[in-house]
Image (spheres, rainbow, N blue to C red):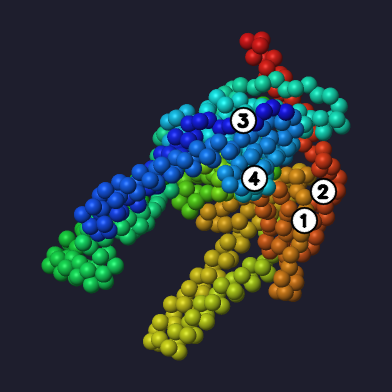
Amino acid sequence: MSHPQRTAPLSVVLGAITSARGAFIGAAAIAFSGVGGGGRLWLALGIFAAAVVIGTGVAFAKWRRLTYTIGESDIRVESGVLSRAARSVPYERIQDVSLEAKLLPRIFGLVAVKFETGAGAGEDIALEYLTQSQGEALRRLVRERRDEDRALAAQGDAPAAAAPPEDEDEGDVLYALTPRRLVTFGLFEFSLAVFAVLGGALQYVDNVASINVWDVNLWYGWLKEQGSTVATLGPYAQALGAAAGLVGLLVIGSVTGVVRTALRDWGFTLTRSSRGFRRQRGLFTRTDVVMPAHRVQGLVIGTGLLRYRFGWHGLSFVSLAQDAEEESHVVAPFAAMEEIDRIASAAGFRLPDGATRWHRASPRHRTDMAIRDAAIFCVLAIAAGIAAPSSLFLIPLAAALVAVGLNHHAWRFRRHAFDETQVYASHGFLSPQQEIATRRKLHSVEIAQGPLARWRGYATVHLGLAGGQFAMRGVPLAEARALRAAVLATITATDYSRLDAPEIQALKGAQSGFSANRLAT
């Protein structure tokens, strides 16, 4: 058992800067408001200085009271100033150790070390902050001890040789998002979020100017004035102005999408090494995550309404650990199917091909969904026929016909398949999504039927997959039972306590061979 250690002392400096940043907004609001009269500037400076001092003191107290201990079988983190909290996580429960460096910590050479347990984001622990070298050394140490514990369990507690350290910079690059492709990706990520930011900023205009943005008469007068100006123009000038406004909106949305994409995915690389898949991305906030190959539970291949027409898709790994706010780890956000096929093969999955025997959802399910959607518009048509002018009821009736046609077309893309090793599901015709899972990593199978489904003879099949969800909707009842029987046969034949044993031994052998090759060269 090692002695308790503290995080980097520069964490206190980061806490002080964060406190100053938060206090600046409040101090600026006081300085530009009428609070305090002529002395409001000094009042703002005093409040700002007091907030910085208090924030620095709190940051120092938290740093002083936060310790972590690297034990033989677990890592222990103790924190808390007034009330103490201790969290101990065995190495065998740690799915991965990731490094995250936001812009300000990166300037000081610091990273946040996150221990992912697969129990949900609220159950994971993090150390903020360590130096870059300390974070990498701690991640390497925890991974080695975790692999040793799992190897011992796989061998029935027989002695196991420790795996040699690995240089994580080595490995084959499976996917890289070049700057040119990043810009193309950003154009498909069209966003008008900048207007939401401007709307939020308008709430503070009345603090620095004599304008009440909530005055309805103010906006009415402005619109009336602009409308009068536009009315004096000719029809060609009006059409040109409308086109210019539309082009400006498209430009703003495109630029916003490119900027947001660049901030999130700048320098995106996916590398395959003997430890697994290493993903690095981010401009200001740089994340470094390694996903062991044997922990990949399934694949999700998605796309967008426009990018699908140009052959672009995205690939995510369903894993025990979450990726920020998402269930799955994005490993190829903007890729061609050939690139996705290569990554899937490296993870031990096989994409569906011409030999895959697809089964569509029940035609009765298609009919019921079409009737459900059309019924909503039919009710609106009746209401319009009673309360509105006589011709308006045709609009919801036309919408009902469109709903029936869309449901019929979508049914052609709602399909599923399973073979000896994998299960597949696909849905969506405007932006299709495919889900692939390994049968031997499924934990449960459930057939769910509502009253209508029981009467009509179809069901939804829910497959229990650690770290994600997998559902097949509208499956004919006979096919659902056959699928359940096949999956249950795989589940009962799988010893989950030793499920990762072959992968762990392969990892040990790969690491040994990897180090031997490096020594030979």
> Can the viewer see residue 228 in this picture?
yes
Rate crowding at label 2 as few (under 14), some (14 to 19) or many (20 or more) other CA atoms within 10 Å.
some
**Which mark lies nearer to you, 2 or 4?**
4
- Give me the C-alpha separation between circle 2 and circle 4: 39 Å
Q: How many marks?
A: 4
- Picture coordinates of residue 363, whole percent (x, y): 67, 67
| Label 4 with label 3: CB-CB less than 8 Å | no
The residue to which callout 2 is attached is 491
Residue drawn 47% across and 28% down?
Answer: 109
- Give me the C-alpha separation between circle 1 and circle 3: 46 Å
The residue to which callout 3 is attached is 5
| Label 2 with label 1: CB-CB less than 8 Å | yes
Three-letter amino acid code at the position of disc 2:
Ile
Residue 85 numbered tag: 4
Residue drawn 41% across and 39% down?
Answer: 17
- Picture coordinates of residue 512, whole percent (x, y): 72, 19
Tell me the quadrant of the picture where the N terminus can be found: top right
Q: Earlier in the sequence, mark 4 or mark 3?
A: 3
**Which mark lies nearer to you, 2 or 3?**
3
Rate crowding at label 4 as few (under 14), some (14 to 19) or many (20 or more) other CA atoms within 10 Å.
few
